[in-house]
Amino acid sequence: MALGNSKVILEKSAYLHEGETEISERAFNLIIGGMLLWGFFLNYLTVALFAEQAIRLVYSMNPFIFLAVYMVLVIVGNLLVTRGGTVMSFIGYTLIAAPIGIVLCVSIQGVPVQTIKSAVLVTAIVALSFMIAATLFPDFFLSLGRVLFFSLLFMVAGSLISLLLFGRHGGMVYEWIGTAIFSLFIGYDWARANTCAKTVKNAIDLSASLYLDIVNLFLRLLRMMSRNRK
């Protein structure tokens, strides 16, 4: 999920920088796939082994403190990914993925296993579909960068206001909007992957973006499926 000036982001990643070495497209894609698996593996370990501890930690903390700590980790992780070297980028990616496992523990609490499996399957289908679409129509998806950025900002602000005024029923509309936005973000970031310089640094950067796109899509699909089931 690339945020900020999309034109600058695309130009920055299109060329090799001093000290960087280009790798093969196969190695580039393998790194992206491996990094995504690493993030999902960290989440799986947290959910499978530490779910109870994670839930107790969240409910024992002031929600504003938890949110502040979570945001600090994600922001620091993002800075390391975008501005650090290869090793620091990997550490930054891990800092982004690790705390999301705690969020997932809370999000799936009380949700039937079948609903979780269905959300995972639909997420995989949607993600793959938009990756294929971005491969076929890269120019279209690359043109969406700035639109998606501002759409995300308006969605976050609108969903908060809607929840305050109308409760969770108002927020449901924004779950659908969020699903559409993050689906398009997957296509946008995959189109970036197909056009940027093939370096380890770019692979990790794009892995972080795709990871956040997919997790956000999954969380919204899970909430919608859970509500529909009820």
Image (cartoon, rainbow, N blue to C red):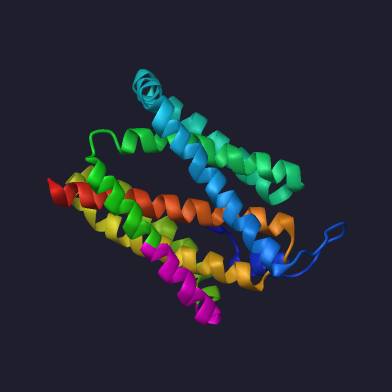
- Position in image of residue 72 (x %, y %): 56, 34
Q: Nearer the viewer, residue 217 or 115?
A: 115
Furthest-left residue in this view: 230
Q: Would residue 100 be seen by someone viewing this image from the given angle?
A: no
Name the residue: 61% across, 67% down: 193
Quadrant of residue 80 within the rendered picture:
top right
The answer to whether residue 213 is magenta is no
The image quadrant that residue 105 belongs to is top left
> Percent x, y for residue 110?
23, 34
State the residue at coordinates (33%, 33%): 106
Q: Residue at x 69, y 59 (%)?
A: 202
Residue located at (41% from left, 70% from top): 129
Residue 35 in sight here: yes
- Residue 76 appears at what percent x and percent y? 62, 38
Q: Quadrant of the C terminus?
A: top left
Q: Decide whether the magenta segment is chiefly helix, strand or loop.
A: helix
Residue 1 falls left or right of residue 66 = right
Q: Is residue 127 magenta?
A: yes
Stretch in magenta? 125-140
